[in-house]
Amino acid sequence: AQQEADKVKKEQAEKDAKAQQEADKVKKEQAEKSEQAQKEQEEYQSQMKAKAAEAEVEKIKAEYQKEQEQQAEYQKEQAEYQKQSSPSEYQASPEYQYSGSVDNNNNNN
């Protein structure tokens, strides 16, 4: 009877060991799947970050472009304004009289 009991115990131990191995295998597979999913998630997020960064760069470029255009517009308006300003206005402010950039015709009239 003792032998019979030992045999049953041994079989049970083997079954337990097999079940444990099976469980470990499943756990390992789950861990690998989970790791893979984690990696994919991280990759996806980094791609999203890259896309967001790209979009940000494009936005900044567009804003810069717009600023440049506004700047150009402003300079054009300034030039128009100065063209329209009469020579007497130039003479009224001393910095224009002594500045070499003003054409001398205005000063020599």
Image: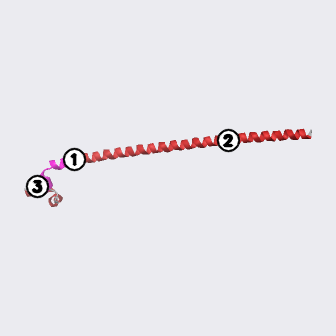
Q: CA distance from mark 1 to mark 2?
A: 72 Å
Chain-order first, disc 1 or disc 2: 2
In front: label 3 or label 1: 1
Which amino acid is tagged 1? Answer: Lys
Stretch of the chain drawn in magenta = 78-91
Crowding near pointer 2: few (<14 within 10 Å), some, many (20+)? few
Q: Nearer the viewer, residue 11 or 76?
A: 11
Q: Which mark is residue 106?
A: 3
- Left or right: residue 32 versus residue 22 is left
Q: Which mark is residue 76?
A: 1
- 90 shown above or below 9: below
- Residue 79 among magenta residues: yes
Which amino acid is tagged 2? Answer: Lys
SS assignment for the magenta stretch, majority: helix
Residue pictured at 15% horizontal, 61% vertical = 98
- Residue farthest left in this picture: 109
Corner quadrant of residue 95 = bottom left
Q: CA distance from mark 3 to mark 2?
A: 91 Å
Q: Position of residue 14 (x, y in %)?
A: 79, 41
